[in-house]
């Protein structure tokens, strides 16, 4: 593996870690612990990410904490980091590979984002864990045509419980302004399985106009 690839993977591990808790600022030591990277490596990479406006520093007491800079971060970098997280999730849970593929085929030529949240995204999957999916579609009028197709695909998979919701882009943005909503939960802990760039384009636009 060449140095460029090593750096890219390291950057994705750090940004991916922050994307998993995007509203939370973290110390460099905590990032190192959660990513399995050395503290020295994290300490070297963070200033480069700050310089590129991917993360920003948040001073709390004597500590310099790290927070994603959604407003200025390049969309391609956010997407690359989330795809890295997605790949790791699918390696741990190969049953999701076929599920994702079948849904993509069923909804081919459709515009949407699919996000998994709950126990799978948090990393605490147990034998009887259910699967929680959120689909974000352009307009409310699109929901009905998506619903039956998704339901038919999920019916083929033996998850103990299968919960999915379909909401519009506007509904998702509205939910980000409220604490206890599925949209907020997805933003805080979700992993995007499909439509990564469109998802983070929504998030960036929200942060740019309203903040979080």
Image (cartoon, rainbow, N blue to C red):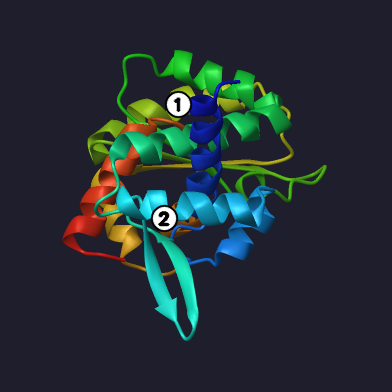
Total numbered labels placed on residues in the image: 2
Q: Going by the picture, which residue comes out furthest to the bottom?
A: 61
Relative to 76, residue 31 above or below: below
Task: Give residue 38's position: percent from left, percent from top.
Answer: 67, 51
Quadrant housing the C terminus: bottom left
Instruction: Tell me if residue 156 can be seen.
Output: yes
Q: Residue 145 sits in which quadrant? A: top left
Residue at the (79%, 44%) spot, across then down: 128
Is 59 located above or below residue 110 in the figure? below
Q: Is residue 73 left or right of residue 158?
A: left
Residue 19 shows in the view: no
Instruction: Report the side of 72 relative to 103 (left or right).
Output: left
Crowdedness near tag 2: few (<14), some (14–19) or many (≥20) residues, C-alpha within 10 Å: some
Circles 2 and 1 in contact, beta carbons < 8 Å: no
Single out the residue that lies furthest toward the left.
209
Q: Quadrant of residue 29?
A: bottom right
Sequence-first disc among 2 and 1 = 2
Above or below: residue 93 compared with residue 31? above
Quadrant showing the N terminus: top right
Picture residue at 64% right of the left edge, 27% below the top: 96
Residue at 50 percent of width and 21 percent of height: 103
Point 32% across, 52% down: residue? 51
Residue 143 image position (x, y, % from top left): 33, 35
Q: What x and y, as percent, mark residue 22?
A: 45, 57
Q: Which mark is residue 148?
A: 1
Q: In terms of secondary structure, where does tag 2 sit?
A: helix
Residue 27 placed where, x, y %?
Answer: 55, 67
Q: Which mark is residue 47?
A: 2
């Amino acid at each position: 593996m060449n140095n460029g690839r090593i750096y890219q993977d390291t950057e994705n591990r750090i940004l991916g870690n922050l994307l998993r808790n995007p509203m939370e600022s973290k110390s460099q030591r905590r990032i190192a612990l959660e990513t399995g990277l050395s503290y020295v490596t994290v300490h070297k990479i963070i200033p480069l990410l700050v310089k590129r406006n991917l993360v920003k520093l948040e001073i709390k007491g004597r500590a310099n904490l790290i927070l994603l800079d959604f407003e200025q971060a390049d969309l391609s970098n956010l997407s690359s980091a989330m795809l890295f997280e997605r790949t790791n999730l699918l390696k741990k849970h190969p049953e999701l590979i076929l599920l994702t593929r079948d849904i993509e085929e069923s909804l081919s030529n459709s515009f949407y984002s699919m996000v998994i949240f709950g126990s799978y995204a948090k990393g605490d999957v147990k034998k009887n864990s259910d699967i929680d999916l959120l689909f974000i579609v352009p307009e409310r009028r699109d929901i009905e045509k998506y619903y039956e197709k998704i339901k038919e695909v999920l019916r083929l998979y033996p998850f103990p419980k299968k919960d999915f919701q379909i909401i519009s882009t506007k509904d998702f943005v509205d939910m980000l302004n409220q604490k206890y909503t599925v949209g907020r939960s997805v933003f805080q802990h979700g992993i995007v399985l499909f439509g990564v760039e469109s998802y983070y384009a929504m998030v960036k636009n929200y942060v740019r106009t309203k903040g979080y």
